[in-house]
Image: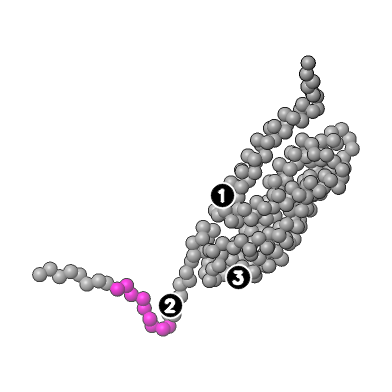
Amino acid sequence: YRIEWGGQFENLQRAQTRLMIVVPIALLMILALLYMTYRNWIDSLRVFTGVPFAWIGGVLALWIRGMPFSISAAVGFIALSGVAVLDDMLLVSTIRQLRRRGRSLDDAVEEAAMTRLRPILMTTLVASLGFVPMAFSTGMGAEVQRPLATVVIGGVCSAMIMSLLVLRVLYVVFNLPMESSDGNGGDDDGHRFEPIEPTDPGSGVKRETAQLPEEVSV
């Protein structure tokens, strides 16, 4: 004789097996897309650090509401992984633009945090308010909706805090050598652009191309 647990427990075991495959694939795809966007691993990992911070917020939100971990909550963590990097991408892209304009690293980080504060807050607010009805639903399907929405709301809030505070520190500490520029511009691939001094038309100085003398055959 043997005893087998069926029903909801069996479905949970099957779902956990699938999630062990789906979650790593989803994270690798997010990291690959970030690398395709920034074309260097440092900026990609900077943005990707928002994912574990968002997961911490999701776990805390479940703990505060006294909800157990379920398949619905796991799906919420997968969705949260894609949403959590939006604020970081906005901040990192702004810092890169300011660096290409010749700003120092500290000034670029500080100015980006100030100028992008409102967009980051609005992104977090919109994502959170959209899940509030699901988080407090009491009708049919509430047992599935509430854990998912709770994870997303807690995660985007903690990801916002990470973007405004922790990411700024990471950008200064883990500084790329190419980011220590001397003020010259550049593109996203790290190519530097040297400024060309214009010729004063009134100075009478003309630019001429030196011609090599032709070979004289003897």
- Picture coordinates of residue 13, whole percent (x, y): 74, 30
Q: Find disc 2 in the rendering and name its residue.
A: 199
User: Alpha carbon of mark 1 to alpha carbon of mark 3: how far?
Assistant: 25 Å
Q: From this viewpoint, which residue is outermost toward the bottom?
A: 203
Tell me if I can see residue 86 in this picture: no
Name which of mark 3 and mark 2 comes first in the sequence: 3
**In the image, which is nearer the foreground, mark 2 or mark 1?**
1
Up-down: is 209 above or below 45? below
User: Is residue 183 shown above or below 33?
Assistant: below
Labels 3 & 2 near each other (Cβ < 8 A) = no
Cα distance between the residues tagged 3 and 2: 29 Å
User: Amino acid type of disc 3?
Assistant: Ser
Residue at point 60%, 53% (across, down): 44
- Please name whichever residue, 69 or 50, is drawn nearer the observer in this view of the structure: 69
Three-letter amino acid code of the residue under disc 2: Thr
For residue 186: magenta? no
Residue type at the position of mark 1: Met
Q: Residue at x 73, y 57 (%)?
A: 162
Structural crowding at the residue carrying mark 2, measured as other residues with C-alpha within 10 Å and reported as few (<14), some (14–19) or many (≥20):
few
| 176 horizontally vs 86: left or right | left
Give the label, 3 or 2, closer to the camera.
Answer: 3
Q: Residue furthest front?
A: 1
Q: What mark, if any, has residue 36 been given in the picture?
A: 1
Q: Quadrant of residue 98?
A: bottom right
- Point 78% across, 16% down: residue: 1
Residues under numbered marks 1 and 3 in contact, where contact means CB atoms less than 8 Å apart: no
Rendered location of residue 90, percent (x, y): 66, 57
